[in-house]
Image (cartoon, grey):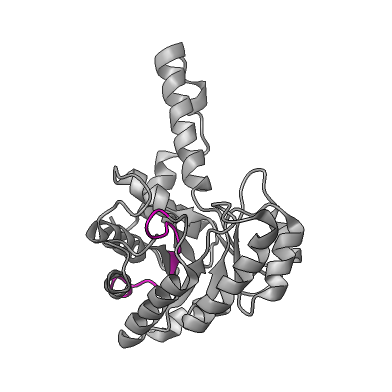
């Protein structure tokens, strides 16, 4: 994957005109999202892991994650950014490098790399530990000739790390360290407060990614606050699996099939795979 597509993907991150990324977990979901008009495809680690029968949380073998992402890349025309969780393996800088090289070889233009969990029982890694991993990811990408978009995720808010009154400053400090280490943007999941989002968008010298979904700030609200990228994380996969659970229970417990009604036909799905 040459640097051109990666740079084009990076240019889609515009504050107040955010890149919208419904997260895919397999080729079919990616093609549905692409057909809806998405400018890029982002994977969800949780949905991808569940589809492969693995628990989310750095439990999937690197080889399986890369193979699944490669199928998605090969199955769509849009650029793909992959959630690589903590980098797989033992999550060392060397593990991150190996994962990044494999993902770049699979054709991705970007990655998410999170600072959760920390070492020795800590909720998240120290800023210095994560910075080393980000630097390793950047070096691995550059050695492969790709200007990879490294979306550095910090879980200060998601994991409720430290005193509430210090979390904003801690996140801003981490953002500076991560960007200095080679990150392209900062991903802060777990936020529902508009003023905190605004403070982060104004205080981070790079594109801010916020995760939205039911009960969270709306797309219009996040755009007005200066967010450059909005993703859904596991929300789409959860909605799909929730519908499957509802239909299965209705059929098995109630002996009914009303929930099976859908506007997606067999032909619609076949049309997503004209080359198959």
Q: Is residue 193 visible?
A: yes
- Which image quadrant: the N terminus? bottom left
Q: Residue at x 35, y 79 (%)?
A: 136
Q: Is residue 232 above or below residue 2?
A: above
**Stretch of the chain drawn in magenta:** 103-121
Q: Is residue 104 left or right of residue 258?
A: left
- The quadrant the C terminus occupies is bottom left
Total residue callouts: 0
Quarter-of-image position of residue 139:
bottom left
Work out whether residue 110 or residue 173 is closer to the camera in this orientation and state it.
Answer: 173
Residue 152: image location, x then y, percent: 49, 69
Question: Is 129 left or right of 67, judged from the image as shown?
Answer: right
Q: Residue furthest top?
A: 254
Name the residue nearer the viewer: 49 or 248. Answer: 49
- In magenta stretch: residue 111: yes
Residue 52 on the magenta span: no
In the image, 6 versus 164, the foreground residue is: 164
In x, y percent, where is residue 35? 49, 57
Whole-percent x and y of residue 48? 37, 51
- At x 48% / y 34%, what residue is drawn? 242
Considering only vertical position in the picture, is 247 above or below 239?
A: above
- Residue at 38% x, 60% y is 119
Residue 109 in view? no
The image position of residue 116, as x and y in percent, is 44, 58
Q: Is residue 250 above or below residue 93?
A: above
Residue 156 image-quadrant placement:
bottom right
Q: Is residue 150 toward the left or the right of residue 84 in the image?
A: right
């Amino acid at each position: 994957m040459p640097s051109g597509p990666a740079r084009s993907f990076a240019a889609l991150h515009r504050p107040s005109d955010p890149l919208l990324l419904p997260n895919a977990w397999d080729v079919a979901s990616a093609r549905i999202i692409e057909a809806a008009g998405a400018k890029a495809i982002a994977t969800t680690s949780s949905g991808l892991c569940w589809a492969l029968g693995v628990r989310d949380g750095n439990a999937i073998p690197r080889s399986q994650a890369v193979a699944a992402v490669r199928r998605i890349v090969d199955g769509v025309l849009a650029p793909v950014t992959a959630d690589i969780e903590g980098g797989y393996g033992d999550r060392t800088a060397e593990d991150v490098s190996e994962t990044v090289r494999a993902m770049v070889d699979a054709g991705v233009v970007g990655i998410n790399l999170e600072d959760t969990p920390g070492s020795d029982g800590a909720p998240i890694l120290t800023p210095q530990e994560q910075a080393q991993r980000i630097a390793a990811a950047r070096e691995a990408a550059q050695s492969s000739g790709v200007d990879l978009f490294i979306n550095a995720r910090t879980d200060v808010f998601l994991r409720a790390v430290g005193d509430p009154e210090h979390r904003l400053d801690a996140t801003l400090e981490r953002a500076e360290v991560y960007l200095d280490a080679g990150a392209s943007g900062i991903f802060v999941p777990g936020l529902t407060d508009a003023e905190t989002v605004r403070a982060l968008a104004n205080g981070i010298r790079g594109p801010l990614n916020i995760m939205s979904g039911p009960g969270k700030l709306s797309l219009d609200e996040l755009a007005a606050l200066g967010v450059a990228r909005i993703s859904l994380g596991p929300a789409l996969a959860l909605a799909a699996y929730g519908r499957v659970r509802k239909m299965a229970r209705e059929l098995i417990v109630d002996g009914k099939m009303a929930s099976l009604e859908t506007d997606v036909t067999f032909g619609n799905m076949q049309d997503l795979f004209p080359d198959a």
